[in-house]
Image (tube, grey):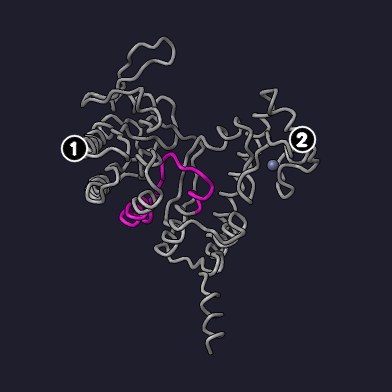
Amino acid sequence: MKCHKVTSQLFSHFSTTVSLLHLADITEKGVTFQSPVDGKPMLLTPEESIQIQNKIGADIIMALDDVVRTTITGPRIEEAMYRTLRWIDRCIAAHKKPDVQNLFGIVQGGLDPVLRDICVRGLVERNLPGYAIGGLSGGEDKDSFWRIVAQCTAALPEDKPRYVMGIGYPLDIVVCSALGADMYDCVYPTRTARFGTALVPEGVLKLKHKAMASDERPIDPTCPCMVCKNYTRAYIHCLVTKDAMGSQLLSYHNLSYMMRLSKDLHTSIVEGRFPEFVRSFLRAQFPKGDVPEWVCNAMEVAGIDISACCAPFPSSMNDFAEEFAA
Ligand SMILES: [Zn+2]
């Protein structure tokens, strides 16, 4: 597990997104997508993607990659991985400000460990300032998801930032951090806010629920954000069903929650108590000890003992039977 000092103020993202694949057509030239303005087809090449990002001037810029859904099978996955490797060279060649802007390559290869390995090696050979793990969070099962993350983080250089794209839920962020990832991006905190859901240490709080109508407490009494200091659940419940302001207040709180989670996670790594952070996070999220199996499997690989957070194996009946027999 490595911790990186993040000095970047600006981050631009022109890589293809799994969730928007239905709007894009990918050929060797580039990605053709529908203009959000007039619906006309527009071609974005790897070179143009870098030129635009050079103009924006972000500290971290992303290579253009060929993305496929992790749920598909067949030769398309291999084609996309090799094309991503060919495109990284076009991106590197087009990059005019390598001294001030960090170009991250993106690992593709679907759920195939062999293809992921080829892609990781290919990108590492190019000695990029940072690496992203792409193509995940597209409907694959959680066990496949964390195994690909674990494989890539283990093979990518420890002294370079490792970024898992499209992640995610607070639980996914904690698990991926345990597996060695450093950076994430996701629409989840604001999207779920628009559906009336708040992120809290115990999981989620649905503000549209009838019970919220008379609840005078803040969303999260432990949260120091402006929304929790000034508004009650009842007030926000009243808004979320009628007014966009409800979504805005919930977005504000959810982003505060994510920032606090990231900050606390980071501090726990710096102070050498990350395993304890993971355990207290899991205890709050799963008070009954029903931690999902994929999380237990991932933590075993990460070398973090979470047995204290999981419900004991139901062996008490056996013990009782043995005692009775004796
Ligand atoms: Zn709050």
- Tell me the CA gap for discs 2 and 1: 53 Å
Q: At x 38% / y 38%, what residue is drawn?
A: 138
Residue 16 left/right relative to 115: right
First to last magenta residue range:
149-174
Quarter of the image where one finds residue 101:
top left
The percent position of residue 227, horizontal first and vertical second, equals: 72, 37
Q: Residue 131, percent across and down? A: 35, 45
Q: Position of residue 283 (x, y in %)?
A: 60, 60
Q: Residues within 10 Å of mark 1 (few under 14, many from 20)?
A: few
Q: Is residue 156 above or below residue 19?
A: below
Residue displayed at 46% across by 35% down: 11
Numbered circle sitting on residue 75: 1
Q: Name the disc covering residue 65, or none.
A: none
At label 2, the amino acid type is Ala
Q: Is mark 1 within 8 Å of ligand 1?
A: no
Question: Which residue: 32% across, 40% down?
Answer: 70
- Nearer to the camera, 252 or 148: 148
Pointers 2 and 1 in contact (C-beta within 8 Å): no
Please tell me whether residue 285 belongs to the stretch shown in magenta.
no
Count of residue discs: 2
Q: Secondary structure at mark 2?
A: helix
The residue located at (64%, 39%) in the rendering is: 198
Residue placed most toward the observer, 65 or 209:
209
* Residue that carries the numbered disc 2 in the rendered image: 213
Precedes in sequence: disc 2 or disc 1: 1
Quadrant location of ligand 1?
top right
The residue nearer to you, when weighing 75 against 131, is: 75
Residue 233's image quarter? Answer: top right
- Say which quadrant the N terminus sits in: bottom left
Q: Secondary structure at mark 1?
A: helix
